[in-house]
Image (spheres, coloured by chain):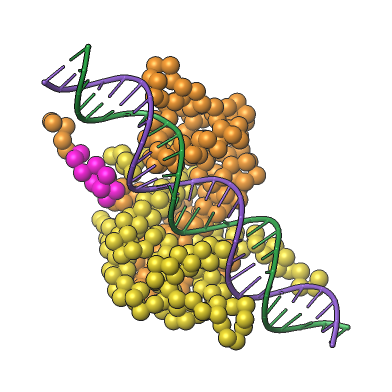
Chain colours: A yellow, B orange, C green, D purple
Amino acid sequence: MKADPACTDLPSAALGGPVSHAVSRVARLHRFAAGKLLKGLGLYPGQEFLMMYLWDAGAVRQSELIKAVDLDPSTVTKMLQRLEQTGHVRRCPDPDDRRAVLVEATDDSCALHADVERAWTNLEEHTLAGLDPSERKELARLLAKVEENLCHEAEDCSEAEDCSERH
Amino acid sequence: MKADPACTDLPSAALGGPVSHAVSRVARLHRFAAGKLLKGLGLYPGQEFLMMYLWDAGAVRQSELIKAVDLDPSTVTKMLQRLEQTGHVRRCPDPDDRRAVLVEATDDSCALHADVERAWTNLEEHTLAGLDPSERKELARLLAKVEENLCHEAEDCSEAEDCSERH
DNA sequence: AACTTTACCTTGGTCGGCCAATCAATGGGT
DNA sequence: ACCCATTGATTGGCCGACCAAGGTAAAGTT
């Protein structure tokens, strides 16, 4: 993480996509910053999202968690295995459906809830330092639009047979 | 990649950092979209950045590449090993400095240059669909500010003695 | 000239993330 | 009741990305 004064100098092949390039760079830096804050709490970057959902939702089926965080099932499985081993999460088979697994944040992890929340708020402040409220709002709005664009693209990639209800 | 209609519903612990949350989600979607476009070209997401630099710079020392893309040296080493094996890159020892390695894009890979450039422009359009020029410009501006914020944070983490030019 | 520091790269390990393939259990259709 | 499609979760493999440690070569010090 060297961080040149002006962190840029776009390669010529990226000139057609300056925002895309910026998104990539910002994402890496942001994740790195999040990781630094989370490390002290015993979490790896990415795990926050699982925990945040579990803190809200209580005991849920793994499939529900997967749907909520919208990650690959295998990713969630592995993350949960690690979170279980580090004592942040408890898992047990669902009595109502013998394929399913119920996941729950442990009491220990709930002690982190407030810390993570504070860290997250901190990160937000770091991220948005020097932006006035209207700029922040505008950024949020534009990101939401971008998210929707990318979302829809991803959608008609994995569904692709959405209109074939009459097989 | 399920993509609910409205891709959101912030967990309560993330309420203090809505933009941070949006950045994370957008980043994942964006990387995913990039990956889809790049796959057809035989590149994995992330490799584009190395190739883009090499296409511009010609034969360079690996350390220069590392500085340019600002990734961990070990990351670059491994990526280059794979890129070498897939024929996108050539490496040879630097005659002037026997520790260093010179890296260069192969002629084969140069054929991809234009394709990657087009893919990248495509991605930009997908990403920014529905944003008018002034919105795009504003988004770029805000992202640049955010990048600088996160950059500086990262900087005084790894350098910490930046102001010691008069040792 | 010998020693120490610094620069350059690599290896090994860990995580998050994806895909493809698999297995078990449920549910629907006939 | 039976078969088949669907759902739920896991495993193995791969890649990007990080850190920590190591090894070699160059540069600086004395």
Residue at coordinates 47% horizontally, 81% vertically from top-left?
Answer: A59
* Front in this rendered view, residue B153 or A89: A89
Judging depth in this view, the residue of A162 and A35 nearest the camera is: A35
Name the residue at 49% across, 30% down: B54
Horizontal and vertical percent for residue A27?
41, 53
Query: Which residue is at the front of the view, B146 or A51?
Result: A51
Q: Is residue B49 magenta?
A: no
Q: Quadrant of residue B32?
A: bottom right
| Residue depicted at 27% across the width and 63% down the height | A122
Does B36 sit above or below residue A56? above
Main SS, magenta region, reads helix
Left or right of B17 in this view: C29: right
Location of the C terminus of chain B (image quadrant): top left
Residue B153 is a magenta residue: yes
Q: Is residue A55 left or right of residue B44?
A: left
Give the residue at x 39% y 71%: A87
Residue B123 seen anywhere in this rendered image of the structure: no
User: Is B153 above or below relative to D30?
Assistant: below
Residue A57: quarter of image: bottom left
Q: Is residue B12 visible?
A: yes
Residue B131 image position (x, y, % from top left): 49, 56
| Number of numbered discs overlaid on the protein picture | 0
Left/right placement of residue B163 relative to residue D20 reads: left
Which of the image's four quarters has the N terminus of chain B? bottom right
Q: Which residues are magenta?
A: B152-162
x, y percent for residue B14: 37, 70
Q: Position of residue A16 (x, y in %)?
A: 51, 41
Q: Quadrant of residue A115?
A: bottom left
Q: Is residue A10 left or right of residue B35?
A: left
